[in-house]
């Protein structure tokens, strides 16, 4: 049973990173990889080549307008959007990893292999509506991430963060599994669209919804929300991010959230939303959770001393803003959500990239450690400053336009109170993002810090610095040329999500 | 109780849900990492029982049976990663008590 050309075309974007991920451990067998720079270089090259090739192939598919399928794998526009999103994020993370792992003095090819497996899992997760394949994708993206969190295993914090992430993540995966099993048992179908259609046929007679259907959907939703790190399923986020290497924390916060949002988009409004009662209930639950997430994320972020923990809580609050798109529930709100995801990719990878570029390793990630760094390397400081301004939602950056579009749609659909809460929440967030800028540009380094710098000078991080610059350019592009970005990239993805129902 | 003996759908579902709740409680209540880990395995296997019960009730549906095989494989991978993490944790702390995992706090 050889796949035909078009089936192969659907598979190739996943096959490339997966093959490279299988190749890398062979290179990593060499015990001298710590001293042999060329082996490390080759491993990073393989990673970047695989991600680049996958990205190039996806853009080719996109511009040709092809939407191949292979069994349960649908490489439609939304999946291609997710693929491009994940490969870009993965490449930025890999580039930052090169610098960060050298700073930590811990370079293992397995790290890159795990990163590539995770990328494959993310693409799989976002490009199917079959619950079995979705579960496989979920596990393929999570299992490497648990290991990646604990990758610098000399640090006790890293292992602890990985452990906590594993326990909570495995529970969430088991809930997702139970939910999908219940939905399967009720309808006899594993395809989400089939489940939705079947459930609609079952409910239309009596008008009441089967409690098993409700329980199954709730468990499924919980699995997604855990990956998005929405409150009250957010407890793991700060610990996992603080333990993880900076680039991996950035990758986890951006890519996992992105594909979970995209898979949620396939599951809830589109497939299970066919049952009106279920759609309304999910929307109501998401409205409450989004509000809670914004409040909890922003208020807790205020009191953090570690920049990394602050960024973790900030990523929780951004999950809240993103979920607002589901609450509004219009096509334009979903487009705004996807647009905000693109901008979020740039600004968050930039923010985590700053930590790597400044060479802050271990527990040296407090605000005090950033003091005066902006003037030492002005271009890096300004680029990172743009990313933080965008996170705070200050015009003319992309973050402002993303939030503006989301809130506009919310008001348009009558959720004025939530929109006001969102605006208030982002006003609060300005405080802790500006604290970073103040530390970067307005405060002088302390004596202890200057002594530390003299004793252990930071390893040069040219690649991480470059990624921050790229991110800043993307953030500005989100602000100034959002029209073409919206029309060429986001809208087609959104339309395909709607189209595969009909 | 009769359901368990004759093996109809309700009996299997009851066992499955019970195991799921027991597993969840184990993760939440027990403070030993290995016990929490066993709780997770219990949850996965509870889902397996429910899945196979449904598949049988639907006339040995192939989809369900294949899903079951995949879940076993995934659970094995999860066990590998989880145990590796438990061992790494034990090397640092000389304990598998979850309450001792208190470095990351604010």
Image: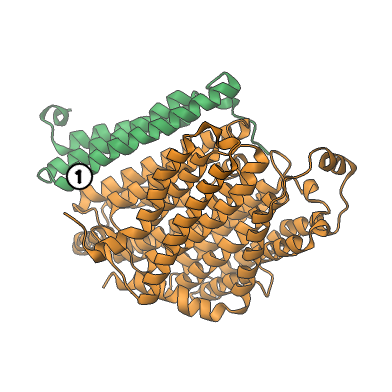
Chain colours: A orange, B green
* Pointer 1 local density, CA inside 10 Å: few below 14, some 14–19, many at least 20: many
Above or below — where is A389 with respect to A1?
below
At mark 1, the secondary structure is helix
Q: Is residue A491 visible?
A: yes
- Tell me the subunit letter for badge 1: B
Q: Position of residue A313 (x, y in %)?
A: 62, 50
In the depicted view, which residue is nearer to us: A304 or A357?
A: A357
Which residue is labeled 1 in the image? B64
Q: Position of residue A425 (x, y in %)?
A: 65, 61
Residue B10 as seen in the image, left or right of residue A15:
left
Residue B106 as seen in the image, left or right of residue B75:
right
Q: Is residue A128 visible?
A: no
In the depicted view, which residue is nearer to us: A200 or A138?
A: A138
Above or below — where is A407 with respect to A257?
below
Q: Position of residue B75 (x, y in %)?
A: 34, 35
Residue B32 as seen in the image, left or right of residue A344:
left
Q: Residue furthest top?
A: B94
Above or below — where is A177 with respect to A92?
above
- The residue positioned 16% from the left and 29% from the top of the image is B4
- The residue positioned 39% from the left and 56% from the top of the image is A123
């Amino acid at each position: 049973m050889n796949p035909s050309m078009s089936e192969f075309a659907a598979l190739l974007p996943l096959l490339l990173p997966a093959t490279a991920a299988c190749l890398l451990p062979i290179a990593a067998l060499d015990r001298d990889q710590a001293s042999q720079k060329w082996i490390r270089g080759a491993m990073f090259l393989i990673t970047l080549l695989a991600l680049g090739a996958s990205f190039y192939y996806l853009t080719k598919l996109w511009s040709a307008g092809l939407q191949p399928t292979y069994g349960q794998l649908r490489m439609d526009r939304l999946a291609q959007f997710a693929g491009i999103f994940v490969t870009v994020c993965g490449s930025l993370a890999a580039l930052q990893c090169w610098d960060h792992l050298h700073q930590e003095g811990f370079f293992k090819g397995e790290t890159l292999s795990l990163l590539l497996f995770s990328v494959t899992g993310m693409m799989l997760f976002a490009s199917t509506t079959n619950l079995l394949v979705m579960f496989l994708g979920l596990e393929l993206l999570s299992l490497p991430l648990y290991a990646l969190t604990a990758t610098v295993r000399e640090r006790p914090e890293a292992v602890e963060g990985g452990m906590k992430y594993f326990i909570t993540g495995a529970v969430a995966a088991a809930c997702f599994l139970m939910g999908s099993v219940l939905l399967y048992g009720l309808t006899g179908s594993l395809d989400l669209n089939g489940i939705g259609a079947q459930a609609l046929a079952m409910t239309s007679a009596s008008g009441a919804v089967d409690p098993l259907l409700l329980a199954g959907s709730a468990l499924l939703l919980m699995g997604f929300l855990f990956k998005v790190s929405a409150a009250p399923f957010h407890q793991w986020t700060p610990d996992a991010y603080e333990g993880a290497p900076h680039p991996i924390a950035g990758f986890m916060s951006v890519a996992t959230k992105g594909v979970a949002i995209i898979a949620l988009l396939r599951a809830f409004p589109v497939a299970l939303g066919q049952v009106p009662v279920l759609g309304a209930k999910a929307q109501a639950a998401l409205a409450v959770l989004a509000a809670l997430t914004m409040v909890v994320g922003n208020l807790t972020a205020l009191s953090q001393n570690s920049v990394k923990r602050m960024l973790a809580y900030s990523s929780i609050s951004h999950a809240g803003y993103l979920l607002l798109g589901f609450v509004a529930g219009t096509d334009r709100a979903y487009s705004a959500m996807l647009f905000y995801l693109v901008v979020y990719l740039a600004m968050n990878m930039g923010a985590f990239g700053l930590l790597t570029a400044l060479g802050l390793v271990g527990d040296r990630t407090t605000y005090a450690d950033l003091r005066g760094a902006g003037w030492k390397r002005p271009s890096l400081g300004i680029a990172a400053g743009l990313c933080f301004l965008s996170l705070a939602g200050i015009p003319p950056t992309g973050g402002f336009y993303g939030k503006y579009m989301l809130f506009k749609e919310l008001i348009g659909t009558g959720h004025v109170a939530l929109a006001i809460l969102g605006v208030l929440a982002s006003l609060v967030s300005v405080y802790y993002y500006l604290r970073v800028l103040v530390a970067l540009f307005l405060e002088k380094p302390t004596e202890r810090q200057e002594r530390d710098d003299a004793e252990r000078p930071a390893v040069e991080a040219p690649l991480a610095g470059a990624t921050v610059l790229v991110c800043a350019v993307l953030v500005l592009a989100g602000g100034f040329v959002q029209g073409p970005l919206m029309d060429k990239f986001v809208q087609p993805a959104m339309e395909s999500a709607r189209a595969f129902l009909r | 109780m009769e359901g368990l003996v004759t093996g109809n759908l309700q009996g299997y579902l009851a066992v499955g849900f019970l195991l799921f709740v027991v597993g969840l409680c184990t993760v939440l209540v027990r403070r030993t990492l290995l016990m929490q880990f066993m709780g997770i395995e219990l949850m996965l296997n509870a889902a397996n029982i429910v899945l196979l019960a449904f598949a049988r009730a639907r006339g040995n549906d192939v989809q369900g049976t294949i899903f079951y095989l995949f879940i076993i494989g995934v659970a094995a991978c999860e066990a590998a990663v989880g145990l590796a993490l438990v061992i790494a944790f034990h090397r640092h702390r000389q304990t598998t008590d979850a309450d001792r995992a208190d470095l990351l706090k604010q």
